[in-house]
Amino acid sequence: MLLTGAGQIGMAIARRVGYGMKIIVGDKRKDNAETIERILNEAGFDAIAIETDISSRESIKALIACGQHFGEIAMLVNAAGVSPSQASIETILKVDLYGTAVLLEEVGKVIRHGGTGVTISSQSGHRMPALTPEQDEQLATTPAEYLLSLPMLQPSAICDTLHAYQLAKRCNVKRVMAEAVKWGERGARINSISPGIIVTPLALDEFNGPRGDFYKNMFAKCPAGRPGTADEVANMAELLMSNRGSFITGADFLIDGGATASFFYGSLKPTNK
């Protein structure tokens, strides 16, 4: 199993589906990857940490090569990414958008027959106005090396880091749809999960950032009335990556306690004061 992003959501998923296999934990910060490696190994798993920058194709290839040293690649869990409060527009597009596209592309070349993958997107991708069919297709099918040249992804077309993040997450969902066709040729499946407010260190950064009040209001007024947990995301990932999800591929699953529903049709609707 390849696990990118040494955070709470990725680790929760790995604990559900990674037993009995070698888990390669990749993160841009090697110390973060080593922390997850230690926690997993102390819980009886078999993990190894490697420094991985998913904004670099060569770094992704090195991650894959590390995994192949131990056998065929059976699973991918991509939980790497940065938040709107953590990074610049350029970094968000390079990591969350381009990096995810390259990762899905490269792993799709080697995933074994019967293999599965999940990539973590976000509710943010569901909050944007609809793109045109042409724009959706561009996000889905443009070769990864040319993605950042698309007109819609130029600095002049992006309002702020939140807008960049929304575009990146919309792209994630579209890439999963397109890659599912290619993965299917190898007898493998790939899906995405779009979590809402999940309590993780990244989310805590958001709570304490410039949009903190917005996020706190969001989970307070969503139908669930609370933020989610990493294990609740792992519940869905476990289904998607098991034989019970064998007819599910190229799909995205919104897990946000109803916040997006409330954003469009409830008390979180922007026009409501």
Image (spheres, grey):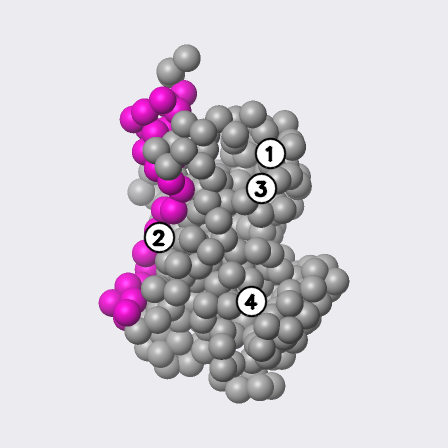
Q: Earlier in the sequence, mark 3 or mark 4?
A: 4
- Is disc 1 placed on a helix, strand or loop? helix
Distance between the alpha carbons at the discs numbered 1 and 2: 25 Å
89 left or right, relative to 146: right
Reading the image, the residue beneath label 2 is 252
Q: Which amino acid does label 4 sit on?
A: Leu
Residue 14 appears anywhere in the view: yes
Foreground disc of the pair 1, 4: 1
Reading the image, the residue beneath label 4 is 3
Which residue is most to the front? 43
Which residue is most to the top? 273
Where residue 209 sits: x, y (%)?
Answer: 64, 31
Which residue is most to the right? 31
Q: Nearer the viewer, residue 195 or 142?
A: 195
- Is disc 2 placed on a helix, strand or loop? strand
The structure residue drawn at horizontal position 48% and vertical position 26%, both measured from the top left corner, is 217
The magenta segment: 244-270
226 left or right, relative to 55: left
Foreground disc of the pair 1, 2: 1
Q: Which of marks 1 and 4 is nearer the N terminus?
A: 4
Q: Earlier in the sequence, mark 1 or mark 2?
A: 1
Q: Which of 65 and 13 is in front in this view?
A: 13
**Cβ atoms under marks 1 and 3 closer than 8 Å:** yes
Q: Which of marks 2 and 3 is nearer the N terminus?
A: 3
Distance between the alpha carbons at the discs numbered 4 and 2: 19 Å
Specify few, some or many for label 4: CA neighbours under 10 Å numbering under 14, 14-19, or 20 or more.
Answer: many
The structure residue drawn at horizontal position 54% and vertical position 38%, both measured from the top left corner, is 164
Reading the image, the residue beneath label 1 is 207
Q: 196 above or below 267?
A: below
Reading the image, the residue beneath label 3 is 203
Specify few, some or many for label 2: CA neighbours under 10 Å numbering under 14, 14-19, or 20 or more.
Answer: many
- Is disc 3 placed on a helix, strand or loop? helix
